[in-house]
Every structure is written in structure tokens, then in C-alpha cells.
Amino acid sequence: MNTRTPEQVNTSNIKKWLMSLQDDICQQLETADGVGKFKEDAWDRPGGGGGRTRIFEGKHIEKGGVNFSAVHGDMPEKISTALKLEGNAQFFATGVSIVLHPTNPHVPIIHMNVRYFEMSTGQWWFGGGIDLTPHYVVEEDATFFHQHLKDACDRYDASFYPKFKTWADDYFYIKHRKETRGIGGIFYDRLSHQDGYSKADRFEFTKDIGTTFCKIYIPLLHQNKDKSFTEDQKKWQLLRRGRYVEFNLVWDKGTKFGLDTDGRTESILMSLPPNVNWVYNHIPEPNSPEAKTLSLLKKGINWV
């Protein structure tokens, strides 16, 4: 357990830090891509709050979004039921959500979300995580990715990484396909004052996860963005994007939360790729790189 110096942690400074995280990540991604620029679309939520949707189209990142939102108001009944919360209450929710769909099939898709939720009843918690979805699983890259996440977790609690990795394996699972969305990562939710942790402790951990994003993704982007690829590999990328769409629209709780709280539809669905394909009963050739990737899309692989 890593107990931090107590500090005032409230909705105002959590929101302020998340906005600065969005700014920093956008700047780093623009530099890494070298061509594209983020376009911002500020929006207001009729029930309270709003956000900044930033969409990216570049040379190496075909489509990306780095979104910030801070919404509040009456707790929708659907959300109360889903979160198993009793009574009428006001809620406040803020977070940064990122999805990047690269141009080159050798560069993986990445997703990150860090968020904070609070109710007028006094309940609060942090949540978030990072997961990677390679079109082609490269074991060395998977180890690099998971090692960075383990290091970030271990700075706070040695139990975090194995617990949050298992959570990600279970969460990012496409049940109707019986395969994981990618190689997982970490996922956590409802981190409150359990086990003696303070709100400041939980905030510091979430901040560390947020700043780990560029340390992970930009090296993977630079390493793979200029690799040559074939038309067949591009077709495979579009098929794997199809799996990504299936998960986000069928299983993802964040998508459902956004829609059930009357969030901005365009911002919620920015995670969907620009081009995608489905082929009936597609089966890769035996012993092909595509078949190898499918064999590694399963729970419980120890990458580090």
C-alpha cells in the first residue's frame, strides 16, 4: 500500500486535472503523428454539465478521440438499477476516454478511460483502465505493454496488477465470439476507501494510470507505423475492427452509461472505427499470423 500525503480532493480539482490530462495527451499525439490536428467540439448536456470531444484524423492515426466530460444531475433510474443504488440522488461523473484506430495494421488499437463518480449521498469512487487490441499480436509488444501497467500498479499495491488484469480479461471478453477483444490490460472500478485507502490515494493511482498512456502507446506507434503491409493484412484489420464494434455496441457498460444518461451520442460513439468489415464465417489459414493472433485472444495469459 502506498499512502500519499493527504490533500484536498474534490470534484473541482479532479475535473481540472482530467482536463489537463486531455490537453497533454492531445499534444503528445499530434507530435507523434506529425500531420493530424485535433478538432474540438464542446457540448452541453441538457440535464447538467457537458464536455469537450476532440477527434483526430492524421497520417498514422486514421481516427482517434480523446474526450473529456463532466456531467451531473438527477440519477437516471436505469443507472441506479445498474449500479444497485437505492433512493433518489444527484450524481456527478467526470472522466477522460480515449480510443485510437491506427492506419497501419501493425499498430494496435488502444483504449483508456479514467473516471470519477460521486453521489449526493456521499458515495464516491474512481474507475478506469487501459487495454490494447492488436490486429496482429506480437508477444514482445504485449510484454512491453503489460510490464508498464504492472509497474504503474506496483507503485501503489502489488495486488493491483494481478487483480485488475483478471478484471480486464473478464470485462473485455466478446462472449458471443468466445474470444477476448485484444490482449487485455487492466480494468478497475468502484475504488473507494476500502482497505484503508483515502480519496487522495485513489486519485493519485488514477493520475498515474492516466499519465502512463502516452508512455505506452507512442513507442508502439513509432515502432510499427512505417512497417509495410499487404492488402490482405488491411482486410484483416477491418475484420478485427468489426470485433471491436461488436464489443462496444453489445457489451460495453461505458457506452450504455453514456446513452442512458442522455450523453452526447456523437461523443459516446466516437470509439467506433472509420472503416470496418464483416465476412461471413471467416476462418484464417492454418499456421498463419492471423490464426496465431486468434489463438492468443483468450483469458489468463501471463504476459509478464
Image: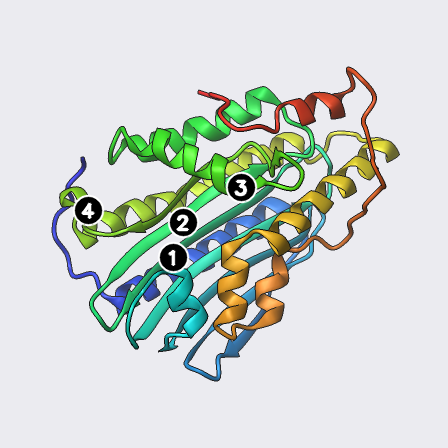
Instruction: Say which label, 2 or 3, has the lower sequence index.
Output: 2
Observer-nearest residue: 147 or 158?
158
Quarter containing the N terminus:
top left
Query: In whole angstroms, how far apart are the C-alphas of marks 2 and 3?
Result: 13 Å
Q: Residues within 10 Å of mark 3 (few under 14, many from 20)?
A: many
CB within 8 Å, label 1 to label 2: yes
Residue 203's disc number: none
Observer-nearest residue: 223 or 63?
63
Task: Tell me the residue that label 2 is attached to.
Answer: 128
Instruction: Say which label, 4 or 1, has the lower sequence index.
Output: 1
Instruction: Say which label, 4 or 2, has the lower sequence index.
Output: 2
Check disc 1 and report its element: helix, strand or loop. Answer: strand
Query: In whole angstroms, how far apart are the C-alphas of marks 4 and 1?
Result: 18 Å
Instruction: Say which label, 3 or 4, has the lower sequence index.
Output: 3
Question: Is residue 38 in view?
Answer: no
Vertical position of residue 22 compared to residue 11: above or below: above
CB within 8 Å, label 3 to label 4: no
> Which residue is at a point 52% across and 72% down the rendered structure image?
263
Query: In whole angstroms, how far apart are the C-alphas of marks 3 and 4?
Result: 25 Å
> Which residue is at a point 53% across and 62% down the rendered structure image?
256
Task: Tell me the residue that label 3 is attached to.
Answer: 172
Query: In whole angstroms, how far apart are the C-alphas of marks 1 and 2?
Result: 6 Å
Look at label 4 and name its amino acid: Gln
Residue 115's disc number: 1
Vertical position of residue 303 compared to residue 78: above or below: above
Task: Tell me the residue that label 4 is attached to.
Answer: 194
Q: Which residue lies furthest to the top in this view?
A: 287
Q: Residues within 10 Å of mark 1 (few under 14, many from 20)?
A: many
Foreground label between 1 and 3: 3
Look at label 1 and name its amino acid: Arg
Q: Residues within 10 Å of mark 2 (few under 14, many from 20)?
A: many
Vertical position of residue 220 compared to residue 25: above or below: above
